[in-house]
Image (tube, grey):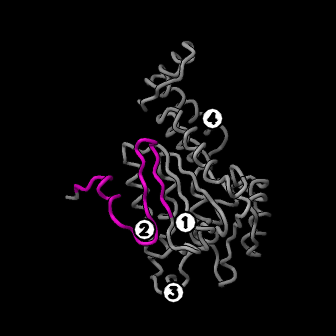
Amino acid sequence: MNTTTPEQFLDNEFDGFTVEVDTARERADIILGRPPYNVIAMSQRETLRQVFEALDAHPGVRVIVLRAQGEHFSSGGDIKGFLEASPEHVSKLAWNVAAPERCTKPVISANRGYTFGVGFELSLACDFRIASETTRYALPEQNLGQIPGSGGSARLQKMIGIARTKHMVMRAKRVTGQQAYDWGFVTECVPDAELESTVDALVDELRRFSPLAQRTAKKLINDNEDAPLKVAIEMEGHCYSRLRSSADFKEGVEAFHGKRPAVFRGE
């Protein structure tokens, strides 16, 4: 029986990235670390999944940030690794890349420079994408005689529609951070020097809210992505009803009437 705690697992050294946990700020950072281009190795995807799951279970973490060393987020995956991996292994890559989406806690992706291939797909699986003006998003797989294989085209089409997705996927076109913001798949686009401070501010903003309400909202929105409107509205009502009896909701109401900051405990 494996008795390793999330904290113990996260103390390991990881190939291609590092993990920083700051319990005082209730924040964890996953930092891609193969500069200058932060290429993501095939084996790294499975380990990243395990790290997201460990951080999800970590009691001292409220918000997770995915970022990178240097001037580029990631130029994508290790091309040679695709030729060496079995078809069965490759078919599971999308499950690993979807780890930020499955995580119950808010996940922010901080992008600058090249954000290509699997680096882009990982970012698309996060809840918030903050781009600097240097960011270039791309799914360049057509140049290799391939297509995105870890949810890139599928998630992008949900966000920006079929025409723009074909423009990016079938023509392997690069999109700037500002254009990504204009198209609606980026939360904010800021000057490069302001990327870290913008992410810091978002982390602190998210920490102010009820952890229970945040988890509920994330799951509800994700689950309703493909639901008919009638079903989505009904599910929203059920979730609202359950939160109605929570201690956090009681605290929020009392804090509102008392004109004081709420102290949420996730209960």
- Compute the Cα span from label 1 to label 4: 42 Å
Q: Within the magenta stretch, is there residue 51?
A: no
Task: Give the number of the disc on residue 46.
Answer: 2
Identity of the residue drawn at 64% across and 67% down: 115
Pointer 4 with pointer 2, Cβ within 8 A: no
For mark 3, what is the residue?
83
**The disc labelled 4 sits on which kind of residue?**
Ile
Residue 138 coordinates in the image, percent (x, y):
69, 70
Q: Secondary structure at mark 4?
A: helix
Q: Which residues are magenta?
A: 3-31
* Residue pointed to by mark 4: 233
Label 1: state its secondary structure. loop
**In the picture shown, does residue 86 fall above or below 12?**
below
Comes first in the chain, label 4 or label 2: 2
Residue located farthest toward the front when viewing the structure as drawn: 193
Q: Sequence order check: which comes first, mark 4 or mark 3?
A: 3
Q: Position of residue 95 (x, y in %)?
A: 48, 64
Binning the other alpha carbons within 10 Å of mark 2 as few (below 14), some (14 to 19) or many (20 upward) gives some
Quadrant of residue 265 in the image? top left
Q: CA distance from mark 3 to mark 1?
A: 27 Å
Between marks 4 and 2, how big is the CA–CA gap? 35 Å
Horizontal and vertical percent for residue 21?
41, 51
Q: CA distance from mark 2 to mark 3?
A: 17 Å
Going by the numbered disc 1, the residue's amino acid type is Gln
Q: Name the front one of labels 3 and 1.
A: 1
Q: CA distance from mark 1 to mark 2?
A: 20 Å
| Residue placed furthest toward the top | 258
Compared with 118, 255 (above or below) is above
Please tell me which residue is depicted at 58% across the width and 34% down the height of the picture: 236
Calculate the distance from the C-alpha at mark 4 to the C-alpha at mark 3: 45 Å
Front of the two marks 1 and 2: 1
